[in-house]
Amino acid sequence: MSNAFTRVGQPEKRQSALLVALLVVVLAISARLVYVQMIAGPSLAAAAEREYTRTYTEHGARGDIVDANGNVLATSVQTYRIVVDQRFVPEYRARDDEGEVVGYGAAAAAERLAPLLDADPNDLGARLVGDDGYVVLARHVAPEVWREIAALNIAGISAEETFERVYPNGNTAGQILGWVNAEGDGAAGLESSLNNRLLGTDGEFSVQIGAQGQVIPTGQRTGTPAQPGCTVQLTIDTDLQHFSQNVIDEAVDTYGAEWGAAVVLDRDGNILTLADSDVVDPNDPDTSRYTGAHSIQDVYDPGSTGKVLTVLSALEEGEVTPTSAVEDPYELTTENGQVFHDHTWHEDQVLTTTGVLAHSANTGTVNIGSQLSDETRYEYMRLLGWGEQSGIAMPGETAGILEHPDQWDGRQRYTTMFGQGLSVNLLQNTGVFATIANDGVHMPPQLVEGYDCNGEEIEPERGEPVRVVSEDSSAQMIRMLESVVASEEGTGTHAAIDGYRVAGKTGTAQMPGDDGQLTEVAASFVGIAPADDPAITVGVVMYNPSSGIYGGTIAAPAFQEIASFALQSLGVPPSGEPADPYPLTPDES
């Protein structure tokens, strides 16, 4: 019996042993599952997600810059940055049209990519080899090129959206706009000074990639969207800006000037044109010599255009009227022994205040200005914007050079009466005439109309309007300045425009060169049109011309071209009545 019992019990023992072994295996597997799913699971999942997920920065597009009519001056176009995860490149198999494998890995990938990226296959192949997960192969790649690259299905190759700055109008307003550097930040002009407004806000997104590093089209995409920068609207009129630049360039070439500039303002102080010679093309700034914006960055003595400020101040203070008799000798010696001359010899004469402006008489202007205190004249200069920046958002704007009367020497006290011994930029000088055109109210000039920041309209800060002189003084001054252009004896006859009355003033200023001698010249003209219902004020300056020196023969013709184009393009109707100028001498009264 014992043997039979033994034979029967052995299978039971074996079954028990198997059950125990099975239980141990199950427990081990369960423990492993618990470990994998509950303990190591999150870290393993994260590792897998990292392995098959790629995160990119999504760059916010830089905001556009547009003109007063909404025409685009600067914009950003979509491009791509081509990148590679080198770890996947060895998996690539290049196939022919029949599907046969004809190449492997980096060498085959480089052969296919090189023509599309305009790269050397050997150099490109070297950049595809390694274990780096992120290598930039090319920047600023056009969308159509990226589509061809994507069609190759090269393992590890992907792309990031980027933006390239484009200026559709070439060099038009180039010195205003400036340009951006390789990093996409503003490097000059408004692109620099308004960089924080124009910059977009970057976002971030993650995509799933396959075993060969390709983006899975149907995979999950997560992240934070990018936000574009603000659109900046300027007061500039693109057509008028382009035309004015051409006129200035031609005048600079004709008269051999070092540089030239033109400014056009409307009655509200909006800058319709800020034109300079030799403007840079912001699409390719390296091929040009960027000289900045002469119209606001360079100074010159206003010369005889500055006489307007002296006479306007005397009118407002009641010291003269348009027909007051003013002695105008060819040579004048002041009480402190300073000697001054008119620009051309003549017999001693008596002119009206209007005649002093029409003849651009230095000695007559000194006799008018001497009736005012230095402090009074200085205060009018400050109220009209001389000696301080206008604040139009352009970098590099000069405040000019205007010393306090306490610092004037015995001669400077008188030279400032006829626009020498102080310096302004063209925008400042044009602003004096724009104030006269606006019934005596000085409007701080404005270049930026506003910002559109993702649907939020923002107006830029602007100085308050300031009444400088009365409407009567302004009206009298405009009528006086018409004699400069309309009278045969006036110095500004080349500024006349058919069908429109023009009020303006010529300027010819001698300035010291590097040797301290009066060897340099600024020839200018600033005018208002139509004089009977002012719509625009235009200022032109030619600096140091080698052929001719007078503002009436160099700057006035450029004024005539620019103002004529502006009046027609803006749809300003011709003058309704002829001019009624004041007499130039007391005998004519």
Image (tube, rainbow, N blue to C red):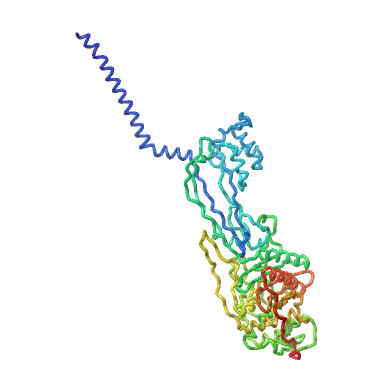
Along the viewing direction, whichever of 532 and 287 lies nearer the viewer: 532
Compare residues 588 and 285 and report the one nearer the observer: 588
Front position in the image: 5 or 180 = 5
Whether residue 490 sits left or right of residue 206 in the image: it is: right
Quadrant hosting residue 189:
bottom right
- Picture coordinates of residue 412, whole percent (x, y): 67, 80
Work out whether 34 lies above or below 298: above
Quadrant that contains the C terminus: bottom right
Give me the residue at 53% from left, 49% from top: 58
Q: For the N terminus, which image quadrant?
A: top left
Q: Is residue 338 visible?
A: no
Which residue corresponds to the image point at 45% horizontal and 40% vertical from the top-left?
49
Q: In which quarter of the image is residue 190?
A: bottom right
Q: Where is residue 111 in the image (x, y as percent from the top left)?
A: 64, 36
Q: Position of residue 360 (x, y in %)?
A: 74, 81
Q: Which of 50 and 584 is in front in this view?
A: 584
Total numbered labels placed on residues in the image: 0
Which residue extends farthest left? 1
